[in-house]
Amino acid sequence: MILETSSYWGLCKIKIYMLCTEASKLADAAGSFGGELAEMSHKQQSGLENNSNRKVESLANQIASNPLTISASDYFHVNRKLFTAIISTITTYLIILVQNRTLEKNPIKLEMER
C-alpha cells in the first residue's frame, strides 16, 4: 500500500514537472518567434510586399505586447515557478505532519503550578 502510494505521488510529480517545463518552453518559443518576426519586418530585403510587411510587423507587435502565457482560467500561470510552488507547499505540509506525528508519540507534559 505504501509503495503504491509513493510511486503514485512520484508519477504525479514527474507529470507536473513535465507539464510546467513544456509550458515554459512553449512560452519561450513564442517569444523568440515574435522577435524573429520583428527582425524580419524591419529588414528592407525581406522580399515581402508592403501590405504583407505591415501585417508581419503588426503580428510581431502583438506578440511583443501580449506574451504567451498558459494559465488555468487566469487563476495561476502554468510554468516552472508553479512546479517550485507546488513542491515547496507539499514539503511544508509534510514537515508539519511529521511534527504532529512526533508530538502524538511523545507528548509534551506541561506542569501547571497552582
Image (tube, helix red, strand yellow):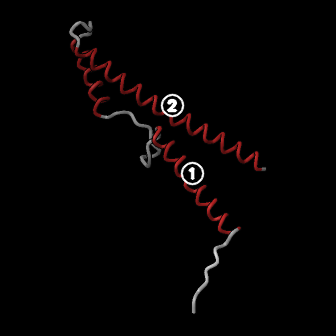
Task: Determine which quarter of the picture holds residue 55.
Answer: top left
Residue 15 in the image: state x and y as whole percent: 60, 37
Badge 1: few (under 14), some or many (20 or more) residues near its Cα, within 10 Å? few
Above or below, 88 relative to 108: above
Task: Answer with mark 1 or mark 2, whichever residue precedes in sequence.
Answer: 2
In this view, the mark in front (1 or 2): 1
Q: Amino acid at mark 1?
A: Thr
Reply above or below: 68 against 72: above
Give percent across and percent down for residue 76. 44, 46
Name the secondary structure under disc 1: helix
Task: Return the residue at label 2.
Answer: 22
Mark 2, Cα crowd under 10 Å, few <14 / some 14-19 / many 20+, is: some
Q: Nearer the viewer, residue 91 or 34?
A: 91
Q: Which dot marks residue 91?
A: 1
- Measuring from the top left, give residue 30's x and y in whole percent: 39, 26
Determine the residue located farthest toward the bottom in the rendered image: 114
- Res. 41 image quadrant: top left
Residue ID at (44%, 42%): 77
Q: Amino acid at mark 2?
A: Glu
Query: 59 or 28, which is in the foreground?
Result: 28
74 or 102, which lies in front?
102
- Distance from disc 1 to disc 2, alpha carbons, whole Å, reads 23 Å
Quadrant location, the C terminus: bottom right
